[in-house]
Amino acid sequence: MPYVFPATFLVLALFVLANSLRILREYERGVVFRLGRFVGIRGPGLIVLIPFIERMVRMSLRTIAMDVEPQDVITRDNVSVRVNAVLYFRVMEPEKSVIEVEDFLFATSQLAQTTLRSVVGQAELDELLSERDKLNAEVQTILDEATDPWGIKVMTVEMKDVDLPMEMKRAMAKQAEAERERRAKVIHAEGEYQAAQRLKDAAVIIEPHPTALQLRYLQALTEIAAEDNSTTLFPIPIDLLTPFIKMQGEKDQSPD
């Protein structure tokens, strides 16, 4: 019997000591309540709690990446899309994250879903596809202001994917194809116009010199003759034969 009380006391002391000591990592803080009242933030390192009187809630200060569930949204121009995003935030004031909201992770997730749906619903499809950075900044600003009373700082919101209906994808593909054809026709017409302009300038230069035109004609014949796989019929202008006709006429008129 004399050894029972010391052994019981030792076990009780070890139990109390185990419940009063806590070790918090560098990125953790402890929100301490004493008899239900908030008394302060402790950590990191070794902290001591008063057994049965103080209670601690462990909070992480690291950045949290939260996946926002896909949301079915109708844009301002009545196009059904499915949008999902990722949210980056961190706890800046642990006491507010514990006292002001019951579950800050769940609350932030729900707020991000509703805000994303609201912002995308106010934008048109073209704006959603081409100005995604602007919409991301708008969602981030709204969430940051709404979560500030909870001691949370929203740093970045990024839309990961915008899923369009198959009919809309086909319509956009046709639109893109038509736009490319239009550009090709404009470029071709512009090239024809520039070529015609150059030919006009060349004609103005060659017009005072008929011999230059004949030389250009002969050069074209030489280029065509280099092709062995085809037969080309090329009309010869009578101007090329005029010098020979004159020479023959002069020869006939000369006395023998």
Image: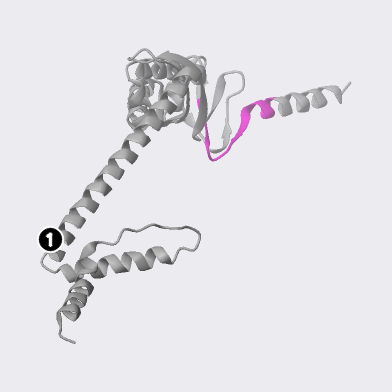
Which residue is the extreme one toward the bottom? 256
Q: Quick check: can you spot residue 31? A: yes
* 181 vs 95: above or below: below
Q: Secondary structure at mark 1?
A: helix
Identified at 31% across, 68% down, the residue is 219
Q: Position of residue 139 (x, y in %)?
A: 36, 24
Image quadrant holding the N terminus, namely top right
Image quadrant holding the C terminus, namely bottom left
Q: Which residue is mark 1?
A: 204
Q: Position of residue 151 (x, y in %)?
A: 40, 25
Report the span colored magenta.
16-31
Are there few (<14), some (14-19), or many (20+) residues within 10 Å of tag 1? few
- The disc labelled 1 sits on which kind of residue? Val
Q: Viewer-proximal residue, 224 or 90?
A: 224
Which residue is the extreme one toward the right? 1
Q: Quick check: can you spot residue 110? A: no
When asked about the image quadrant of residue 213, the answer is: bottom left
* 190 vs 99: above or below: below
Q: Position of residue 131 (x, y in %)?
A: 33, 31
Q: Position of residue 98 (x, y in %)?
A: 48, 20
Q: Viewer-proximal residue, 202 or 158?
A: 202
* 222 vs 135: above or below: below
When asked about the image quadrant of residue 113, the answer is: top left
Q: Viewer-proximal residue, 20 or 102?
A: 102
Colour setup of the view? one colour
Identified at 23% across, 68% down, the residue is 240
